[in-house]
Amino acid sequence: MLETNFCHLESWSTVQRTLRVPKSETSGSVQSLERAFELLELLADSGGAQGLSQLCTSSGLPLTTIHRLMGTLTRLGYVRRGGSRQYVLGPRLIRLGETASMMLGSWAKPHLSELVDLTGETSNMAVLEGDTVVYLAQEPGRHAMRMFTEPGRRVEPHCTAVGKAMLAQLPEPQVREILARAGMAARTPNTITDPDLLIAHLGVIRRQGYAVDEGEQEVGVRCVAVAVPDAPAMAAISVSGPQARMTEAALKAIVPGLQRVAAELSKDFSSHPG
């Protein structure tokens, strides 16, 4: 699970000190930090690995600057040297990513509670981490019979409402790559296991603005989800309950509130920079 909180970065002062380059080349250590994080994000956007010349092309920075910054990040453990003279994301980022996910879940809690107040049903937040959906937070519903998903649980994206809501935000080639790597196991008789059928289904989700899990992950459970726009990570929130309560009429009442809360959550995330 991804977690990141820069307040817990033990070597922050080290980063500030070692990434400083001559003032003739930059405005100081702040610009060097910005460039270092830009390089990390470029590595993440490319799947976690790039060569020096690729980083030069994608960042527009001089080779000498990139070499110096990547050397520092490598010494600190945030980058390592892979095969074919490539730089790859390093293991120290795992702890940062895990703390960040915990913070996202914490910020989402009040919004999930609002959904429970609106619907009476269980609400969830999840992110897409690589090829897997990771649940970060849940608020239990008001009913005696309610859904439970432990935060930290990982599931495939093709069989959940949150997963499909997030996949619908991605270009088709990327979706097909995720499905090929993650697989499309049949969790229930209702699970969509054909990639072409799911791609068509994602088009419907994009047009209507929400996704529904029709007992595709667990028999007898229905879930409706929407993506969280402009979140710091690909994220979605959902409301789930027994199919007997999650009727078509219930979904029509739930979706507007779900979309509104997703927009509010997006604004909340934007107020917590970094």
Image: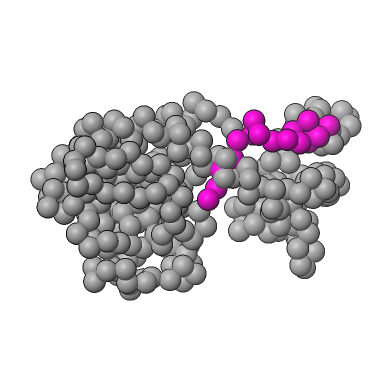
Its colouring scheme is one colour
**On screen, residue 243 above or below 142:** below
Which range of residues does the magenta coloring cover? 1-17
Q: Position of residue 227 (x, y in %)?
A: 36, 45
Residue at image position (49%, 69%) is 181
Q: Specify the quadrant of the image occupied by residue 237.
A: top left
Note whether residue 252 is visible: no
Q: Is residue 157 left or right of residue 56?
A: left
Magenta-drawn stretch contains 11: yes
Residue at image position (55%, 48%) is 2
Note whether residue 185 is visible: yes
Front position in the image: 264 or 10: 10
Q: Position of residue 220 (x, y in %)?
A: 19, 59
The number of discs equals 0
Residue at image position (35%, 50%) is 149
Q: Specify the quadrant of the image occupied by residue 80.
A: bottom right
